[in-house]
Amino acid sequence: MLRKVAKMLWEAPLNLERFLIIGLGIVITGLMFAEVLVRYIVFSPQLWVEELIIYLVWWFYMAGGAYASYKRNYISCGMVHMLFPTKPKVLIGFRAVADAIGLVMSCIVIVLAYDQFTYSLQVNPRTIHLLLPLAYARLALLVGFVLITLYCLTQFIGSIRDLTRRLPATSSAGSGN
């Protein structure tokens, strides 16, 4: 029972991220298509559409970034695997260091994003045409990096766990891998 609840809580943000990536991708594409049609048929750009797209792109981008962090589909350097192909502990150690760096950096960005969000709430800047409060677009940065930090933390814990595990013994004859 407890595992099911934990699994549901873990998957809820992932499902929301998937929904935002797909849903906002469709909405943003549709708005851009409509804007191009209106611009070239009526010869009148609708600047409010561009404003709305930029607002939505914040959420789209951060949902994609959080999901990529969960899947470990971010840019990484594969040189370590070429330098130490037969040393799994070294590879796991490098992965743990990389996870720790990601965790520290995402924590720093959370602080900066929180400051930016609270400042935006106080000053209340708005978009020019739709008068949308920018604080809620900037909230995407805070929410996205909280999720990224959560994923970095779980990956770091997993790397430490892998580092402390005993590896199975392999034959010294080698398999060429």
Image: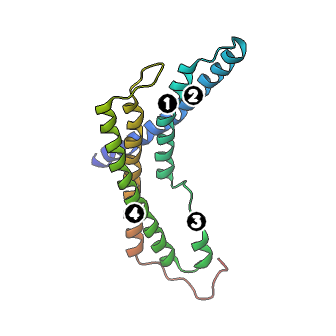
Q: Which residue is drawn at the image coordinates 42% and 70% (left, top)?
A: 162
**Does 154 sit left or right of 79 as displayed?**
left
Q: Is residue 10 above or below residue 16?
A: below
- The disc placed on residue 56 is 1
Give the residue at mark 2. 28
Task: Evaluate if marks 3 and 4 touch, with contact meaning CB atoms under 8 Å apart.
Answer: no
Name the residue rendered at 57%, 79% in the picture: 84
Residue indicated by mark 3: 77
Q: Is residue 150 left or right of residue 169?
A: left
The amino acid type of the residue labelled 1 equals Leu
Earlier in the chain: of badge 3 and badge 1, it is 1
Residue at 52% in and 34% down: 57
Q: Going from the N terminus, do you reach mark 4 or mark 1 first?
A: 1
Amino acid carrying label 3: it is Cys
Q: Residue 61: x and y, percent? A: 51, 40
CA neighbours of label 4 inside 10 A, class few (<14), some (14 to 19), many (20+): many
User: What kind of element bears circle 2?
Assistant: helix
Residue matched to label 4: 156
Whether pointer 2 and pointer 1 mark residues with C-beta atoms closer than 8 Å, the reply is yes
Residue 115 is drawn in which quadrant?
Answer: top left
